[in-house]
Amino acid sequence: MLYGSNLVRIPPEIGAMTNLEEFTPYTSYRLHWFPYEITRCRKLARSTASTRALFGNYKLRPPFPRLQPSPDSVTDLDPGNLDPRRWGTTAVHRCSICDLPIGQAGLHQMWISLRVATDVLPLLVNACSSACAAALPSGARDYIPTPHTGGRVDQPPSEWD
C-alpha cells in the first residue's frame, strides 16, 4: 500500500516479493514508471495506479524520457552508483530479464508498457545483453508495441484521440 506516497522510484528488488498480491501506488503522483522486475511477482492480481501520472498512458500520453545509448562496455561505469536523473535508477546490479549480474558486456536500457495485474504500467528494463532485450514480449495493446528508448516515439492512437 503506497497510497499517496512521495516516492519517485520503486527499487527493482520488488521482484523478489514473489507473494505480493496487491500493489496500490494510487495518488503517488511522483511515480511515473516502475521496474521491469515487478513482472516477477507472479501472484500480483490487483493494482491501482494513478495512470494519468504514468509515462505513455493512453489518456494523456506523457512522453517517455530518452534513455542513454547502450554503452558497449560498463568498464567505465559504476553500476552501483548511478545518477538517477541520467539512468532512471541509482544502481543496476542484475539483469531485469535473466537476473544474472550485469557484466562488462554493456547495459541495455529500454522502456516497455505491459499489463501488470489490473493496470498497464511503463516499465524500465535494464538488460545485460541484446539477447535478453530481444527476449522481451510485445507491448500492451494500444501502447507502443515494441521496447524503445523513449524520446520522440509515436504512440498508437486510442479511443481518446
Image: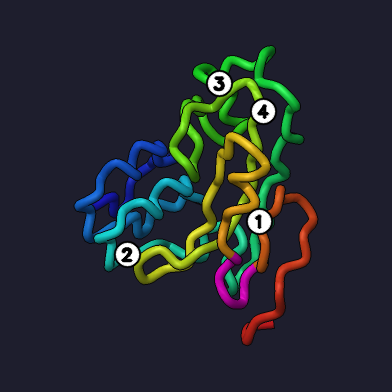
Residue 106's tag is 4
Residue 148 position in % (x across, y down)? 70, 53
Q: Residue at (56%, 62%) from the top-left corner?
A: 137
- Residue of label 1: 147
Disc on the earlier residue, 3 or 4: 3
Which of the 4 image quarters holds residue 14? top left
Disc on the earlier residue, 2 or 1: 2
Main SS, magenta region, reads: loop
Q: Amino acid at mark 2?
A: Ser
Residue 136 position in % (x across, y down)? 57, 56
Secondary element at tag 3: loop
Secondary element at tag 4: loop
Q: How is the image coloured?
A: rainbow
Q: Residue at (52%, 32%) from the top-left corner?
A: 89
Residue 79's tag is 3
Question: How many angstroms separate mark 1 from mark 3 (CA)?
Answer: 22 Å
- Residue of label 2: 47
